Image: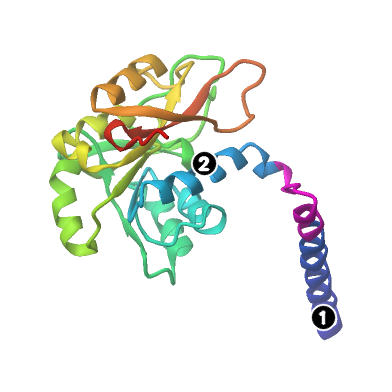
Amino acid sequence: MYNFIEKIYLNWIGIIMIKRLIESIGNKFGVVVVPDWRATRLDEERHLSKLLRYLNVDCVFDVGANVGQYGRMLRDYVGYRRTIISFEPNPIAFNKLKIASAGDQQWHCEQLALGNTTGFADFHAYDQSDLGSFRDFKKSIHAPKKMNSKTVSVRVEKIENYINLAKEKYKFKRPFLKIDTQGFDLEVAKGSGNAIKDFVGLQSEIAFQNIYDNSPDYISSIKLYESFGFTISRLIPIHEAHFPDLVEMDVIMIRSDLIVRS
């Protein structure tokens, strides 16, 4: 038994050493070596790393955190070490989010949905939890044809009602708003009210082809964010699941008054 465990441990150490050797050789030649699954995310990681420093962000509102993928990216690949507040209403996903954030004193979790109303609402918790939404799937070639789900009642709050208490508790001054709520992003932004001006930047999923009923297209989304005083900083591919036509991207935006051009 001990020999078996020792072999597994030595193999794991060997893989880590090979990985570090490849990364070291790549760095010497100015080459970035990443696994295939990270290739489409590399531009996002690099841009966020630069932008969050440029904006001196001291708190990220991670709205629609799911199981903590965005927070882990900020910590592991973006180099962001300051406050994260992750919001996730789905009980099953929230439990995994708590595990992902465990031991990180600067990463806080709220079992809460953010939107443009307050109270409780029905949430579709799908088997594939990152697709969970207040919206139903649309009849589209890009939407899942069938997926098991259950409806759960979740608490909904507006950012404009939440942010002042959060400022007192976490002592931040320059927050960044990330929204990934599966067709519900604009409701979150609208629920910010005048507090949207407190955010120095934002990141939101935008749809070129909608997979949820009554969800906005990319033109409506960008126009609303621009009306709030934000300017596009980057368009980011989300994944390669849809090919060859474009279905979704993330837009990263900066508050227009914070742009300094040389």
Which corner quadrant of the image does residue 97 belong to?
bottom left
Which corner quadrant of the image does residue 150 belong to?
top left
**Magenta-colored stretch includes residue 27:** yes
Image point (67%, 40%), residue name: 39
Image point (81%, 63%), residue name: 21
Q: Which residue is mark 2?
A: 47
Q: Position of residue 12 (x, y in %)?
A: 78, 69
Q: Which stretch did the figure color magenta? A: 23-36
Residue 59 is labelled as none
Residue 6 is labelled as 1
Can you tell which of label 1 and label 2 is closer to the viewer?
2
Q: Is residue 88 above or below residue 228?
A: below
169 relative position to 252: left or right = left
Q: Position of residue 94 (x, y in %)?
A: 39, 54
The residue carrying pointer 1 sits among few (fewer than 14), some (14 to 19) or many (20 or more) residues within 10 Å by Cα, namely few
Find numbered disc 2 in the image and state the secondary structure of the residue it sits on. helix
Q: Is residue 140 above or below residue 231?
A: above
What residue type is disc 1 on? Answer: Glu
**Magenta-colored stretch includes residue 43:** no
Task: Give the mark, 1 or 2, whose residue is nearer the N terminus.
Answer: 1
Outermost residue on the front side: it is 262
Which corner quadrant of the image does residue 216 belong to?
top left
Label 1 – label 2 distance at C-alpha: 41 Å
Image point (21%, 30%), residue name: 190
Quarter placement of the C terminus: top left
